Amino acid sequence: MNTTPTSSRLHIALFGRRNAGKSSLINALTNQEVALVSDIAGTTTDPVSKAMEILPIGPVVIIDTAGLDDVGPLGELRVKKTYEVLNKTDLAILVIDGTEGVTEFEEKILQIITEKNIPVVGVINKKDLSNYSQLQKKEWEKRLNLKLIEVSARNKEGIEELKMMIIKKAPSDDSIKLVGDLIKTGDLVILVVPIDKAAPKGRLILPQQQTIRDILDTGGIALVVKDTELDKALKSINNKPSLVITDSQVFNKVGAIVPPDIPLTSFSILFARYKGDLEELVKGVRVIEKLKEGDKVLIAEGCTHHRQEDDIGTVKIPRWLRQKTGKNLQFSWSSGMTFPADLESYSLIVHCGACMLNRREMLYRISYAKEKKIPIVNYGILIAYVNGLLPRAIEIFKEAKRIYEEE
């Protein structure tokens, strides 16, 4: 709990041609030999990430990418990976080789960055090796409609100015809370955490950790219990809790124990709102009633993990959906940082709680599914729905409740 997870850090990615000095620039920014540097074009083959702190922004992840002008079959795959990084980029740094100037590659990537509404910082690297004039610099700025900062990654010249520009351009939205806007100082929140064979040994999983921290940051009181001790815990406290948050997999059991006048939701539903678009995900759950025999369902997870017996993504959700619909549905799975591009054959996407993805990546996945007209729902919403508890679980989210009832 002492380390900010990657998914909660601002993602800063560097884009540019091969040998523009992106890796050298990352090393200069971090003051570490993070990225491999070479005079050979195409040294960086896959995105490389480094977690660090940039004050006053706080925790960030800096991502190095392959050159946009990479060639050959492998080069095309590397460029594709580079463009995929944009889906999780909060702030882009466009790196221009000062010895070469602005080309169509910079114009193309800048256009895509702009279309995705990603703030961008422009950098001319290799100032120490270049002989461009200030007139040429102004022409490049006019061509890109972007202010360009001059740096030398090798000599670390202009690095502080670049950091100041990163701080200035970095997006910030402190209004997005996990649970802090649902409670007030002094409120008691009970968190139900089942400890079974799927639970990691000796620690809590990330969504549970982050929820506890947000409660503490708000001045609330967090009481953590297993589902087997929930009834005893409720009877032992004098004050009624303001909220109960449960692991989705014991939603049915917890719903039967918690009195109807106490608000109840799940970690996964909180993350659906915190990381994505709760209303859009709630819309998606209604499609379950309309699934037909043989329809294909994609189950997507943002991480890779060892599959346990009775795994939620590969075993439980397919079983629940078949039981709920009475149909023989067909299932496919994806995991990790790559989201399938060919969604057209699916009738529904069921996504995990996205604790390992940043908000921009999850919003991209939701918007891409929406663009392809494929309904999408997340684990927590689906589990609450199949257990008949969804109206109660989203009661505290008025707009989501309204949309669910209208749908």
Image (cartoon, grey):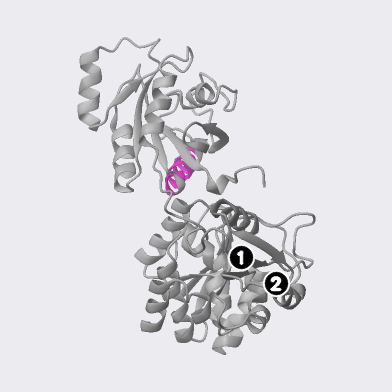
Q: Is residue 176 left or right of residue 133?
A: right
Is residue 85 located in the magenta-colored stretch of the structure?
yes
The residue closer to the viewer here, 237 or 304, is 237
Residues packed near mark 1 inside 10 Å, few (<14), some (14 to 19) or many (20 plus): many
Q: Nearer the viewer, residue 9 or 47?
A: 9
Q: Quickly name the residue at label 2.
A: 237
Q: Which type of secondary structure does the marked residue at label 1 adopt?
A: strand
Q: Are marks 1 and 2 in contact (CB under 8 Å)?
A: yes
**The one of 233 and 13 positioned closer to us in this rendering:** 233
Which residue is depicted at the point 47% across and 73% down?
Answer: 396
Q: Which mark is residue 188?
A: 1
Tell me which segment is drawn in magenta: 75-87
Q: CA distance from mark 1 to mark 2?
A: 10 Å
Residue 253: x and y, percent? Answer: 68, 81
Q: Is residue 249 visible in this depiction of the protein?
A: yes
Relative image position of residue 346 (x, y in whole percent): 47, 72
Magenta-highlighted stretch: main secondary structure? helix
- Horizontally, residue 186 falls left or right of residue 391, namely right
Q: Find out whether residue 150 is within the magenta segment.
A: no
Give the vertical position of 149 relative to 401 (above or below).
above
Residue at disc 2, secondary structure = loop
Rendered residue at 50%/31% (across/down):
54
Q: Name which residue type carries label 2.
A: Ile
